[in-house]
Amino acid sequence: MQDRVTMTVTDGVADVRLARGEKLNAIDGKMFDALAEAIDSLAARSDVRAVVLSGEGDGFCSGLDMAAMAGGDLAGLDLTARSHGPANRVQQVAWGWRTLPVPVIAAVHGVVFGGATQIMAGADIRLAQPATRFAIREVHWGIVPDMGGFALWRGVREDVLREWVYTAREFDAAEAQAAGFVTRLVEDPRAEALMLAARIAERSPDAVRSAKRLFGAMGSAPEVVLAMESAEQVTLMQGANFREAVQANMARRRPVFRDV
């Protein structure tokens, strides 16, 4: 994994980086495998409270490594096989971030092209450097976005998204923010994301994970969401971390929470 994706965990924050900077972190078969491995590793950890996803070098990710694809790098891939729950192998590298039990913050810069736009979309929060260039490039190559984008872009203004997909044109960070494609623009996205993740990691991990489950259910019928809110709250109020939050706030001290 280390030659494509690196990961360190400090004080509950996982710092995950695409590590193929010399190729603008272009996605080849090894990158697909490394990202899926990183997601699986994070899903199994109880000591991680937030994740920051970024790319080394001059850009977050330039999309698929088309030279590698032309050389048969993904020959034999069965896109119809559901290898990761509802997702196939390539969808997992985007969809998988959304299914993690903790918040994921994407910090992007340089270029975010093609599949990279879908990987970024898997994050709960997306921070971009103001000079970042975006493009959903698949139609340019005669294909469609198929790494989970249509399942993840539900919060993006649809008419603008349709234009981007149909034309495959580039758009800038300001346009991306205006359409809800990114959360906000900051000069140093990774530094800002790490600070934000550290703040999340200071909160009750039980409550944060519960909130993420509720966000995942927001598209369900109202009666389902309302019942789920109540069930989550009952469970939280019976836990040690809830008692610690109340006691720490009353005593005006920093809480010490147990990992899930």
Image (cartoon, rainbow, N blue to C red):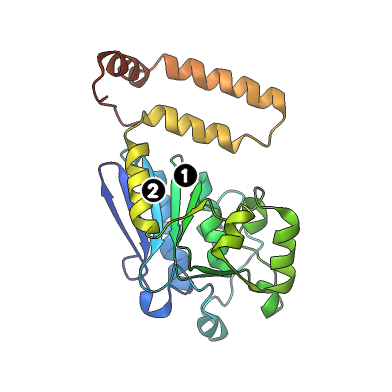
Kind of residue at disc 1: Leu
Real-space Cα separation, disc 2 to disc 1, in angstroms = 9 Å
For image coordinates 37% across by 59% down, the residue present is 188
Residue matched to label 1: 100
- Determine whether label 2 and label 1 are within 8 Å by CB: yes
Residues 5 and 194: in front is 194
Residue 146, image quadrant = bottom right
Q: Percent from the top left, x then y, of residue 158?
A: 73, 54
Seen from the viewer's position, the closer of residues 215 and 79 is: 215
Quadrant where the N terminus sits is bottom left
- Image quarter for residue 129? bottom left
Marks 2, 1: nearer the viewer: 2
Residue 250 relative to residue 186: left or right:
left
Q: Residue at x 44, y 47 (%)?
A: 104
Circle 2 crowding by C-alpha within 10 Å: few under 14, some 14–19, many from 20: many
Q: Nearer the viewer, residue 241 or 186?
A: 186
User: Image check: 142 left or right of 62?
Assistant: right
Residue marked by disc 2: 51
Question: Mark 2 vs mark 1: which is more N-terminal?
Answer: 2
Residue at the image position 40 percent from the left and 28 percent from the top = 206
Residue at x-position 48% and y-position 72%: 29
In the rendering, at what x and y percent does residue 192 appear? 36, 52
Looking at the image, residue 66 lies above or below residue 195: below
Q: In the shown orientation, is residue 211 left or right of residue 52?
A: right
**Residue 252 in the image, given as x and y percentages of width and height:** 26, 18
